[in-house]
Amino acid sequence: MTIRALYRAAKVQTAAAPYDTLHLKVFYPADDQAIDAAAREFGQIPPETRRAPFPVVLFFGGLNCHPEGYRWLAMSLAERGIVVVTFAWIAQDLPGMIALSPGLDASRLTPDAYGEGPTAAALTALLSALAALQAEGPLAGLLDLQRVVLGGHSAGGRVAIESASRRCAPQLAGAFAYAAHTAAFVQLGFPPGTFLALPDELPLLLLGGTNDGVIASSAQRYGTEWADAATPLRRTLSEAIAGGRRDSWLLLIEGANHFAVTDPFDPTTGRAFLDQPLVGPAAPIRALIAEAVGLFLDAQLRNDPDAGQRLERIAAHPLIAYAECR
């Protein structure tokens, strides 16, 4: 399987220049039998059309995490016949705070505004970019824009799961996140220890690690203390959704840390200094993350009963410390 990518740019209409541009990388399964003279000249290999139309994942990276750190995951999902969009956005989410951002709309995180719209500030621009890709270019007519899933890591995972509602966009079909939860910021006016409700309309997969030093070190933001790094993820599953549909999952991975989902790992920005070391090699942990996400997407996007059964059996994997489905 050959995986290729193309680049696009998109404007965020609600942001001010120069912090108003997304730089997208769009991964897709390519047809390596269609490498013609034009492909050799310009490097654009046509997509493989056998599995089209392709569902789409929009991936929101962590704060100050470069999107290339998620390339391995994007390529793994593209091998399953899913188009994956990562993006870089140098943004000013808060006055004076300039960062590589997943696009956190802080105005939607206050007690008066939460739940009134997506917390993902980039969502509208990303969906517009998908419409443009569907209309013109190598992927024209090959995208299934009624099966769009939001995925993310850390702060990006948070905006993904908080924005996974058909009230935000009717084409959304689910969400997944690594190292994300919905504990509310006390500085924004929430009572200590509050966990914000999720839309709870669509399938959900939460993943996290038992050795997440960033989450473990951040309880003061939320006016509370946590027994361990897994506590806010467990509470998100138990308090942020009602459950009952058996399509919302929590998988905790033994020995995984906050940045286990990134490769290559960049220690020069963000809060990497708070993290704990991985326990054991990284490759099996990343392979488990990719398998769990891939099975979740196959089960929910393609209604594949075998994928759903394999996702249920993944709880027995030796690296799974805890699994729950609601």
Image (tube, helix red, strand yellow):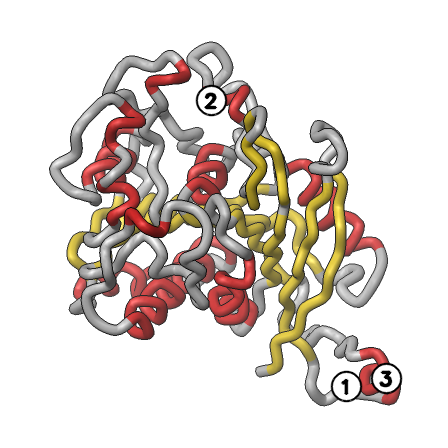
| In this rendering, the label closer to the viewer, 3 or 1 | 3
Instruction: Report how far apart the C-alphas of labels 2 and 3 lie in the structure.
Output: 48 Å
Between 149 and 89, the one nearer to me in the picture: 89
From the viewer's perspective, is 208 left or right of 118? left
Alpha-carbon distance for marks 1 and 2? 48 Å
Q: Is residue 72 left or right of residue 14?
A: left
Q: Quadrant of residue 41?
A: bottom right
What kind of residue is marked 1? Answer: Ala
As drawn, the residue found furthest toward the left would be: 227
Residue 1 position within the rendered picture, expressed as x and y whole percent measured from the top left: 57, 83
The tag earlier along the polypeptide, 1 or 2, is 1
Q: Which residue is mark 3?
A: 41
Disc 2 to disc 3: CB gap under 8 Å: no
Q: Which residue is mark 1?
A: 34
Categorize mark 2 by other alpha carbons within 10 Å: few (<14), some (14-19), many (20+).
many
Give percent across and percent down for residue 222: 29, 25
Left or right of residue 124: residue 229: left
Check disc 2 and report the residue beneath it: 109
CA neighbours of label 3 inside 10 A, class few (<14), some (14 to 19), many (20+): few
Numbered label attached to residue 229: none
Kindly identify the amino acid type of the residue bearing the numbered disc 2: Leu
**Residue 46, above or below 184:** below
